[in-house]
Every structure is written in structure tokens, then in C-alpha cells.
Amino acid sequence: MSAQIIDGKAIAKAIREKTKAAAARLRRAPALAVVMVGENPASAVYVRNKVRACNEVGITSIEHRLPQDCTDERLLEVIKALNEDATVDGILVQLPLPEHMHAGLILETIDPNKDVDGFHIYNTGKLVTTGGGFKPCTPAGIIELLKAIDYPIEGKHAVILGRSNIVGKPLAMLMLQENATVTMTHSHTPNLKHYTLDADILVAAIGRAKYVKADMVKPGAVVIDVGTNRDENGKLCGDVDTQAVQEVAGWITPVPGGVGPMTIAMLMHNTLISAQKRQNIF
Ligand SMILES: NC(=O)C1=CN([C@@H]2O[C@H](COP(=O)(O)OP(=O)(O)OC[C@H]3O[C@@H](n4cnc5c(N)ncnc54)[C@H](OP(=O)(O)O)[C@@H]3O)[C@@H](O)[C@H]2O)C=CC1
Ligand SMILES: Nc1nc(=O)c2c([nH]1)NC[C@@H]1CN(c3ccc(C(=O)N[C@@H](CCC(=O)O)C(=O)O)cc3)C=[N+]21
Ligand SMILES: [Mg+2]
């Protein structure tokens, strides 16, 4: 048996095209401010990909680069100015921030109505209660991938490896909304395999290269690989041992070309929604 590959690149492209068409109907192009502090090389790649997507979709991108030794106060000034700038629809502060800064505090100063990452506690609160806020891009992109392959989430057992605030936890909430039965696991979970072998949908978001092996996966399962790691040869790889697992799984996302492009497509989508709201489209 060999899994079908979920083509995140193609699905993301379709979302960007829809976003582009809708953005062109606005009075003013949506604008996204991307703030990057320091010189993290991985962050630089993602920021470049985000700016490229903005250009393609017709979103104005505003890049702010601050030095590694930037203070919380300086970054807060930049965010305050962006909050007050009526032409800015989305604000994204690239994570991780340097060690000496207080990321939690900083994220709470972004105007929740411009928080297109969906990381502010206001949007987190909406996510767990009524819905309607900005949904974090990676989890939202994963739900879109499952919809694109017409996979019925309702009643399925979704097992999530990793409980970060940006992937694992918000994804659990979205899966619950879709009526999955959700199991969250983390580094203190004993006998992980016990859970993964029962998963209809297995999501790996732990940051460990090729950690998920074929003997951990139920035959026919949908395997979603969020990991963005480097293998022993410095090559980009996921949290899943793709080559082995694709012999067991029913569906699998590749790295690159799976979840990563969806994260960026959903960021474009969220920025569009923000601009539409600001321009009273709905
Ligand atoms: N493609 C994309 O768009 C994105 C990719 N990523 C990638 O996804 C990966 C995860 O990132 P992120 O969500 O930020 O996670 P973090 O690095 O913040 O946290 C990792 C999580 O995995 C858990 N964990 C670590 N080892 C194990 C293990 N052996 N078994 C079970 N759980 C484990 C940790 O548990 P504990 O809480 O107990 O420490 C923690 O909850 C990274 O590779 C990152 O680069 C991230 C965001 C977007
Ligand atoms: N405020 C904030 N928001 C984020 O959304 C955010 C963040 N900080 N910090 C880091 C993580 C990680 N992340 C990725 C985005 C795109 C790819 C992506 O495009 N991946 C490509 C490959 C890219 C490459 O070649 O390295 C792919 O999988 O095909 C990966 C990872 C967003 N994150
Ligand atoms: Mg990917």
C-alpha cells in the first residue's frame, strides 16, 4: 500500500488565487506589516516567503527589521504605531524573539483586530468559545487540507503530537469544532504509540526530525506533518519518517510542500478578512 500525497503546494495556490481575486475588489489593497527582530536564518526564509506571497496576491507588505539587541520598549513602540496606522490591516511579529525579550507580553499589545496570526489571548479566547476571531494559520491550514481531500473529520480520532500555543493547542480546538475526538500528547506522554496507533488523523508538531515511524501509524490513517527540521545532511525534513510511513498511511503531507505553504496561504486569507472588515465589506 502507498499513501496518497496531499499536495499542500497546489491547495495553497488555489487559496492564494481566491484571496487575490477578492483583494482586487477592495477600494484599497490589504496591507500586512511583518516585524522581524534579529538575524534568525530560518525566520528570514519564512519572512521572505511571506513577502513573496503578499506580492503575488496583491497585499502590500511592510517589513520592519529590528536589531538583535532590540528592547521590549522599542518593539512596543513599533507595534503601537502599526496599531494606530489605519492603512495597516495585519501585524505579524515573527517568532521566536530573542531570549531577552518577552514574547507573551508583546503579542498582547497587538490590536486583536490586526492579529492575523491569531496569537493574541482575545483571539485565543474566541477560538475556545464562540469562534469568529482570527484563527492561527497553521492549524487553520491543516483543516483546509483535510477539506480539500474531502476527508470527513466528524467522529474521527485526531491525535496531536505537541501542545505549543501556535500549533498543537489551537489545532485541538479547531478539530473539536469539526467534531473530531481529540487526544493531545506531549513530551510527558508515556507510551505515545498507544495513542498514535489508534489515530485516524495523526498530526506531528514536535520539532523532531523523522520521529514518527511506520510502526506508530494505523493503516490508512491521514498523517499531517507540521515539522520543519534539518536532517543529518542539513536537508529540510518533517517530524515524520515520510518514506517509511507512506507505506502504511492512507494520506500524507510532504515536507516541503505540505503544511508550510498552507500556513502562508492562510496568513494571506486572514489579512484579506481583516481588510474587508476595515473597509466595511461585511
Ligand atoms: N509548517 C509550518 O507552518 C510550521 C512548522 N512548525 C514546525 O513544527 C514543529 C513544532 O513547532 P511548535 O509547534 O512551535 O512546537 P514547540 O517547539 O514550541 O514545542 C514542541 C512540542 O512538542 C512536544 N514534544 C517534544 N518532543 C516530543 C515527543 N518525543 N513526543 C511527544 N511530544 C513531544 C513538546 O512537549 P512539551 O510541551 O512537554 O515540551 C511541545 O509541546 C517545529 O519543527 C517547527 O519548526 C511550527 C509552526 C508552523
Ligand atoms: N509570528 C509567527 N507566525 C508564524 O506563522 C510563524 C512564526 N512566527 N515563526 C515560525 C513558524 C514557522 N512557520 C513556517 C511558515 C512557512 C513555512 C514554509 O513555507 N515551509 C516550506 C519550506 C520553506 C523552506 O524552504 O525552508 C514548505 O514546507 O514547503 C514553514 C514554517 C511559520 N511560523
Ligand atoms: Mg510543509
Image: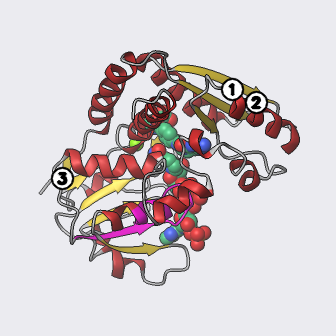
Return the x and y of residue 185 as percentages of the image width and height: 46, 74
Q: How many marks?
A: 3
The amino acid on which the numbered mark 2 sits, given as a three-letter code, is Ala
The answer to whether residue 237 is above or below residue 171 is above
The residue sitting at 29% across, 51% down in the picture is 243
Which badge, 3 or 1, is on the more N-terminal residue? Answer: 3
Contact, mark 3 vs mark 1 (Cβ under 8 Å): no
Residue 71 visible in this rendered orientation of the protein = no
Q: Which mark is residue 3?
A: 3
* Residue 277 within the magenta-colored segment of the rendering: no
Q: Please, what secondary structure does the residue beneath circle 1 have?
A: loop
Contact, mark 3 vs mark 2 (Cβ under 8 Å): no
The residue sitting at 45% across, 24% down in the picture is 53
Return the x and y of residue 84 as percentages of the image width and height: 71, 31
Contact, mark 2 vs mark 1 (Cβ under 8 Å): yes
Q: Residue 51 carries which label?
A: none
The amino acid on which the numbered mark 1 sits, given as a three-letter code, is Asp
Snapshot quadrant of residue 280: top left
Q: Please, what secondary structure does the residue beneath circle 2 have?
A: helix
Q: Which mark is residue 81?
A: 2
Alpha carbon distance from label 3 to label 1: 48 Å
Q: Name the residue under label 1.
A: 85
Alpha carbon distance from label 2 to label 1: 6 Å
Which badge, 3 or 2, is on the more N-terminal residue? Answer: 3
Q: Please, what secondary structure does the residue beneath circle 3 have?
A: loop
Q: Nearer the viewer, residue 121 or 253?
A: 121
